[in-house]
Amino acid sequence: MKRSISDVELIRMIKSGGKLLDSAIRYIYSESGWTILVKKIVRNKSGSEQDAKDVIQEGLVILIIEINKDRDEEIKNLKAYFIGVCRNVWLNMFRRKLKGREIIDKNIVLDEKIEYIEEGIFQRELSENLDALLNQLGRKCKEVLKLWSTGYNHEEIAKIVNYDNANVSKKTKSLCIKKLKQMGLRPEDWKY
């Protein structure tokens, strides 16, 4: 059977310090049933078991500090006061966690935007460099290689650039790649 200690007795034990304070803390943790209520509050607001333990510990520290400041006259019901303090501690922790998640989410979105912008800049620079390089090969090579590297087959390329057939497109592509290799480039260096 759980023993019951009155608010007056608990306050006296806390103010006395030493072994009496230890007994008061043990009572609040184990026998009072107060911590069970605090754990329910924390769990109902998406908190973990560790969150609940942290809240209880911080709430107990605040309770002890307030009693030792002789504010116990203002405390009408020790259980209600302790649970209220713990609720406030949890709400503050919960807000900090949400704020932290928001900051992390904003940073992730910002990082993704930066990566997207950087990728766009990289692609534009790559495209400009490729255009300059392909211009050195001539208009026909540029047309054929651009179309081929973006996925067109040789029949489609032949129709687009007005070649007689796909074989002409294949031959042009081969000659253009040969020129690129002579310039010291591999196909993966210039492919769109």
Image (spheres, grey):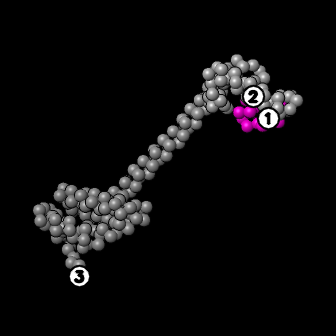
Name the residue at 34% across, 69% down.
37
Residue 143 is marked as none
* Residue 180 as seen in the image, left or right of residue 2: right
Magenta-highlighted stretch: main secondary structure? Answer: helix
Identified by mark 3, the residue type is Met
Viewport quadrant of the N terminus = bottom left
- State how far apart marks 2 and 1 are (Cα): 9 Å
Residue projecting furthest to the top: 136
Residue 154 is marked as 1
Disc nearer the start of the sequence (3/2):
3
Name the residue at 67% across, 32% down.
192
- State how far apart marks 1 and 3 are (Cα): 89 Å
Q: Which residue is mark 3?
A: 1
Local crowd at mark 2 within 10 Å, few (<14), some, or many (≥20)? many
Residue 173 is marked as 2
> What range of the chain is rendered magenta?
146-158
Residues at circles 2 and 1 in contact by the CB criterion of under 8 Å: yes
Q: Position of residue 116 (x, y in %)?
A: 58, 36
Name the residue at 78% across, 23% down.
140
Indicate whether residue 12 is drawn in magenta: no
